[in-house]
Image (spheres, helix red, strand yellow):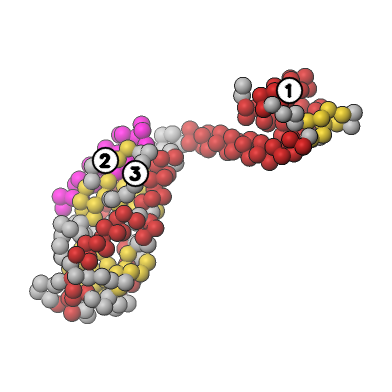
Amino acid sequence: MDLIRHLRFFVAIAEEGHFGKAAVALGMTQPPLSQGLRRLEQHLGVELINRTAQGAVLTLAGRELLPRARLLVDDAARLLAEAQRIAGTRGAVHWGVAGAIPDRVVTACVGALRGGGTVTTTTGASVDLVAEVRSGVCDVAVVEHPALVDGVVARPVVKLPRWVVVPAEHRSAGAQRPTFPMLTGLAFAAAARATNPPAFDTVLDLLRERGLDPVTVSASDDRAVFAAVAAGNCFGLTASPPTEVPGLTWLRMAPDALALRVRVVHRPGAEAHADVVDRVLYRERQR
């Protein structure tokens, strides 16, 4: 029995209050509509509609079940529309990237993916990107590690170089051998914990192991991190290589421990796109 189809019959009759009008609304004749409703009532074990001379009247059971039936019918319609949208965009590549990934890596991935068609890029939190790959909205994504990757295909972890960035006037900026305790008193500007709790906690644990237990302030990407650091009371981490930026100094501290760990995740069937992105990441790792 096609439950959704028969629930659609029930909802149409309830809304129109008349079998004939419901049949017209559904683009069918009245006899199969009436037969379908009877089959639904037999399947559910309750009577849903009273057939009267004035029209179709909901029973007590019908009134109680109608809201749930509407939800199921509406959800089925949304599912069909989303499937048609996804099917209609095949040939395009939909990929996602976490905010911590530096711009040069993002643009390199887009350039490499262009051979597969039009490229659409989503920047977001790792937890959201995994969910979008799992649902099929994204074909492939680069997320921070560690992250929960249930329901997607996960590639090996790749480590990208990452630096500590501090205010240019801070004492650590001029030190020959800067240490983490030197950063005491500065807040840690980083993406909010909710964007990827495992990765956030891992970095804080590493800082604490090295004698630093900072207050954290939210900074969604490199631009926000740099702005917070330039204000003079924060430090941050960045995978963007050292460059001349007023008010900022890059420090190389515990490079292996603080490396940005990332991995490619993809939906089944998107192996070719994942291979392309993986190759870009491995090239960046060797810089």
Residue 107 shows up from this direction = no
- Front residue of this view, candidates 40 and 99: 40
Number of other residues with Cα within 10 Å of mark 1, as a class: few under 14, some 14 to 19, many 20 or more: some
Residue 282 part of the magenta segment = yes
Which quadrant does the N terminus fall into? top right
- Residue at image location 51% in from the left, 34% down from the top: 83
Name the kind of residue labelled 2 in the image: Arg
| Residue designated by label 1 | 38
| Residue designated by label 2 | 155
| Residue designated by label 3 | 149
Mark 3 and 2 residues: CB-CB less than 8 Å, in contact?
no
Q: Which of the 4 image quadrants contains residue 218?
A: bottom left
Q: Is residue 13 left or right of residue 137?
A: right
- Residue at image location 23% in from the left, 76% down from the top: 184
Number of other residues with Cα within 10 Å of mark 2, as a class: few under 14, some 14 to 19, many 20 or more: some
Residue 215 part of the magenta segment = no
- Among the two numbered marks 1 and 2 on one chain, the one whose residue lies closer to the N terminus: 1
Number of other residues with Cα within 10 Å of mark 3, as a class: few under 14, some 14 to 19, many 20 or more: some
Residue with the most extreme right position: 53
- Front residue of this view, candidates 215 and 261: 215
Q: Is residue 18 left or right of residue 155?
A: right
The residue tagged with tag 3: helix, strand or loop? loop
